[in-house]
Image: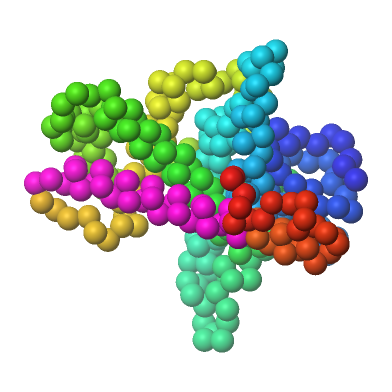
Amino acid sequence: VIKFPVDLTHAPYSIVAAGVQLPPQRITLPFSLITDGPNNMNLLTPGWLLHYSPYTIARSEVKFANRRMAKRHDFYTGWKILRAGVMDMLVDARESLLSAGRRQQQQQQQSGGEGTSGNRAPASAVQVYKTDKAIPGLGANQLTEKGRQIGIKAYTAAIQRYALRGLLHRLVTMAKAQDEVLSAEDVLRHVGLEGVLAVSGHDMETTTSSTSKVNWPVLPWNEEAHTDPEAQWKHQHSLLMKELPSIISSTTNTNNNNNNNISILSTLLQKCVALEQDHAKRVYQSKSRDDARGAKTVPGYADVHVAAEKDSV
């Protein structure tokens, strides 16, 4: 039961579990799962769909793309779920989750650091965040520390995969268009990574959204990146530059020789491969769980459903 007014415009692709009563509120954590929680307060897990059910997203994108066969609907179909506008929402949502963690650490330090009792569990292990007073965008729900970490991980993986996919596509397009081998400097210049070492040592940039003004999402087919590849690459490159310090700092094989920029490009492509492999694994696992659950519940389920190992998605 959803009791209006409810604003989920900045929490797209979220799921409200059956039987849940959703009181009036505003949620800005995309791809969330909202279920019944303890103490008569709903439990929200941000990024749940991205982390635990990526097959749902992948299958939906395939369906949306196939709908472009209808010419009358071509202008508003075929758009991606993980598109520029949604990525911006993920950046804002992740920052809300990260900020909550930083505030918690500050409170721990102010209240005596790591505590005086050796048997006391860290505050982060037992912390439960309640309503948007604790985390902007949480609405009238509660969020566990485990759920906060799941959200950060899911949002970060999606943001970086989106940006690195843009980098890979840019490189492939450039290679197909060139008749001769380009120098390393030309390649880096083409993808906007020339002199990237100047920014790779800084902390990851963060952005905070303003709740003081109305900022309605743009419809998918009205986004500039929907029809303009250069606009999409510009957006992907912007996110890539912001994520670069995080990607580089999480990699241990970056060396410090004269080819550092090339080394960083190699690192980024390796990270892209790792994210794609992880995503493909989770897509397969989520579909396999659906297959097992369906076959156990519905007689003849396997006869009318494509198994995960045969699914083209």
Q: Identify the image quadrant of residue 211.
A: top right
Magenta stretch mostly in which secondary structure?
Answer: helix
Residue 223: where, in percent of width, then height?
56, 21
- In the picture as drawn, the residue positioned furthest to the front comes out as 303
Residue 101: where, in percent of width, then height?
53, 57
- Point out the image quarter for the N terminus: top right
Is 153 situated left or right of 138 in this image? Answer: left
Answer yes or no: is residue 76 visible.
Answer: no
State the colouring used for the structure image. Answer: rainbow
* 85 in magenta: no
* 269 in magenta: yes
- In the picture as drawn, the residue positioned furthest to the top comes out as 72
- Point out the image quarter for the C terminus: top right
Q: Give the residue drawn at x 61%, y 52%.
A: 310
Residue span colored magenta = 258-285
Residue 253: where, in percent of width, then height?
24, 59
Q: Give the residue drawn at x 45%, y 44%.
A: 161
**Residue 92, above or below 20:** above
Residue 128: where, in percent of width, then height?
67, 63
